[in-house]
Image (cartoon, rainbow, N blue to C red):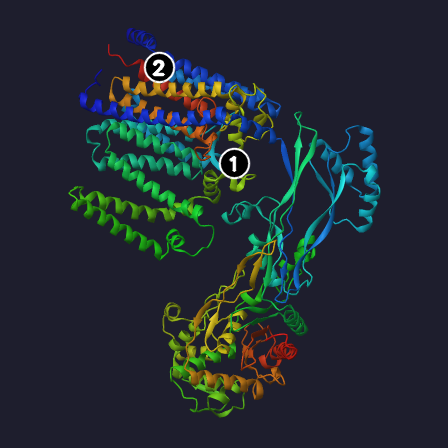
Amino acid sequence: MVWEGESGLIQEKFDNRTNRLFILFVLCMTIIFLRVSFLQVLRGRYYYSLSEQNRTYKYIERAPRGIIYDDKGIIICDNKPVVTALFYPFMTSKSEGILEELMRRIEKILPGSKDKILNSVRTSMVVTLKENLTKEETFRILEQQRNLKGISVVTEMKRFYPFGENGSHFLGYIGEISQQELNETKFFGYRQGDRIGKTGIEAQYDSYLKGVDGGLLIESNASGRQTRVVEKIEPVPGDKLLLTIDSELQNLAEFALEETARPGAVVGIDPSNGAVRILVSRPGFDPNNFVTGSPEINGYFTRKTLPMYNRATQAKYPPGSVFKIVTSAAALNENSIDVKQTFNCPGYFTLGRKTFRCWEKKGHGKMSFSPGMINSCDVYFYNAGLKTGIEHIAGYAEKFHLGKPLKIDLPSESAGFIPASKWRKAAFPRGWVNGDTVNVAIGQGYLTVTPLQAAALASAVASRGDIFRPYLVERILDNSGIKVYEHVPMNIGNVDLKDEVWDEMHAALNGVIEQGTGRAAFVEGMKIAGKTGTAQNPHGDDHAWFVAYGPVEKPVLALSVIVENGGHGGSAAAPIARKIFSRLKELKKDNLIN
Amino acid sequence: METTGRQENTFLRQIEHIDWIMVFSVLAMFLLGLLLIYSATLRTGNPLAFILKQGFGVMIGLLALLIATAMDYRLYRQYYTQIYFISIALLLGVLIIGKTYHGTRGWIDFGYFAFQPAELTKIIFILSLAGYLDKFSKELFKWQKLTVPVIMLFSNAALILVQPDFSSTLVYFPVFLGMCYAAGSSAFHLSAIVLFGAVAISFPLAKTLLIAGGEKNFLAGVLSYRWELFVSLAGLGFAIFFLWWFLKRWKIRVPFFYFAVVFIIIAGATGTSYFVGKSIKEYQKKRLVVFLNPNVDALGAGYNIIQSQIAVGSGRVFGKGIFAGTQAQLGFVPAQHTDFIFSLLAEEFGFVLSSFMIILYTLFVWRSFNVARQSREKYGAIVGAGIAIMFAFYGIINMGMVIGLAPITGLPLPFFSYGGSSIVTSLVSVGILFSIYIRRFRY
């Protein structure tokens, strides 16, 4: 039949095309039919047996998390056995009297178990009666084992941090996975109730640390109620992490900073490869509290001193005079000043109508490069900075990898900030004035760095320009001891200064310790070099900075120390460095380090 | 008086021409559906409540079916723009006054039952799109004539996506393509649209599938819209150009235009995919990954696929018997009274009934296509084709999902799945098919 008011041609095309669509449909249905035949006829027996097995369910036994060691093999994050009492509803006889008797007995040992058992019998599910049994409770249950059928005592491994607060910031803590995290692709395959690392290494290396859960496979018979344990799958513990941290120096630094009773951070890096030896942020938190669920943790998130905040990698401070290292690198390498060139310091410096002060009110008199650095003379660096210009200073700061994250293997590292030219143009419509350059030259103004970046700066000076990506995990071994990961030092930047500039710089920074503002860090018998800094803080007392590295001949440690509101770097921060380097000297004497 | 009498007579005479095969296949499907729903909801302890509610839907649906059959479908052609705007108004209305279930603002509540406008608008979409295609059928080979249909498609799809109801929008695309194709649009233009859509959607999914986190390699760069993407696009451009040049050398003349269009489409779609990627939710990406490899998460999201396949397979040839499917009755198969109802049928009645059901459904779709072929004029033919494609798509995707051949999309199986809106819409669609079919003769 021909369509009304149409030519037969259009209809023919329509018919052809709908026929094609229908054939496509039949093709799909044929595939579905074949697949159903395959599933039901060819593989029916297999799927039938699967559906029978399906009457099993799992009681999950969590795998112990991987153990974390320091660089000498000392355990800094462990698992502790915790005894838990479980009730299996299908192991007891269903008769009322026996269950009553069982509940009466267990109620005496573990009060509150009765309701849990009743609930368990009703739902046919295994319940935990009590976690963290005391020795006494455990013994009493074991004594009466014969009369307590269905109750079993199992040991589970719980996270334990032997050093408590020390190292808490790089270790992190663990907690139950949140609903939001479950939806993230990153946490694919995780289940509700899983415990995951929330910060620090626990979070960064969670996939290695978590291991594979095991458990009991419990089967029900045809009536669907009475069940028995068919299989016990042993959990596979997580991988072992071998860190670069030297826990002795770490603890030393923790206590030294704690003595100042102020917030702060200490970071120590091996200049030859970027291995992080010390990473302290104070105040810290005790990760054990997150395992036990102690009420103490509420304070961690509300206290004004921010104990959960990893100052070492997240906090940004103006670098203060520490930045004079960068300013002088730019000035000398670009030949903007000569090392012998002198500037007079009367205690202040005038630029137009503005006056900039030197920290030494009396003034330093005539200063050349070395004395300028040793005394940290601000006026000398005002002059040097102006001669060099902000473009060069910012450029060298970038070479020293300031203003961008170093990508240490920890979550949420801050970038810090250098006033690069693009930002300056946007932020200063009237233009960047010399006064801003003068401020940046001595590390004040818009500049900020993290303590980690300050340590990397010292490390770059120590290694004559090489910057390595800082890292904490040296090696990862799986449960059977096979190496699954090993860090390869990664050179992420190079500050190529002329040799004579490095020589001058090293000599001047050594002078800071021997006769300058950093005398408080002097260690008899070890040649170290460093620089103090005092970061102006509009909200209170100045922050005390100190960066150093040593021994100068063959540096093994580059250090940065910041003490919030500590005042002068030379008096508040340098003594902490002295303690660390003194210990390093002793260790070296005992040939404990090469 | 006389006119109405004559019309009634006509209708009675027309009803004699009804497609009895279709009547019986539809009847068989929803009656079997009621039985399955009863079995599927035994576990809840109150299966009758479900049956009553579904029965209520069936009654409303049958009433609507009668009205739709009696109404002359050519009325829709006359008012196709108006009904298009009614559907848009419905979708806008539900966004304002709609009720939210499971995070989707897609229901209008009437107390005893809730109605889902998106179910109705897809029929209106078929009716109005057919109106346009019918009116411009002689010019459909021009690409300009596809702009209005594309706008109709995306206005509907966008309004449903903001509810957000990912699965209800799915059916629009095959229906759109099939109708335009049948009505005479150029296959090249339609392929271009498909290519654009495929690239725009697959791009963000590929990222989820191929790279886990912040990996740093070339592929990761391409999929993260970094510079590597521009390098690849430039490379693709060269490759396409080279292919054209190569074919030309071998005296195979394909106009350069086609190659240029393909390149522009891919480049444009990659750009669009950036926004698509931002609007797809994590769990939706996750579902696709699980579809491709259910064992990655056998106790979590991959559970549904694995359990439903076990259910189908374990039914074997004769089934475990009614109400005796362990997979279904012990609650291993999710949504077994709605989206996964086919797995229950396969488990309890075995291959005997599941193959019968596949044949029954195929028969029904065949009769629907037949309506399109038998229509006395073009509008009815296009509408018939649209409805047939809709049912075909639902059948393929739903059954494919249950046996692990298609991703889990949450599309129901028409006439079988529990759900009032779904059964009413299906029956209304059948009514429209009847309306076309019984008027196929000229008097």
Residue in the image at 38% along x and 15% along y? B22
> How many numbered circles does the render carry?
2
Q: Give the answer, above or below, for where B48 lies relative to B157.
A: above
Residue assigned mark 2: B70
**Numbered disc 1: what chain?**
B
On the image, the x and y values in percent for residue A154 come to 73, 45
Residue drawn at 22 percent across, 37 percent down:
B143
Q: Is B311 or B78 nearer to us in this picture?
A: B311
Q: Name the spot of residue B204 as percent of width and height, x first.
A: 40, 46
Q: Residues within 10 Å of mark 1 (few under 14, many from 20)?
A: few
Tag on residue B102? 1
Can residue B202 be seen in the rendering of this structure? yes
Say which chain tag 2 marks.
B
Q: Residue at x 62, y 57 (%)?
A: A173
**Vertical comparison of A205 with B122: above or below:** below
Q: Quadrant of residue B88?
A: top left
A186 in relation to A169, above or below: above
Which numbered disc, 1 or 2, marks the residue closer to the eye? 1
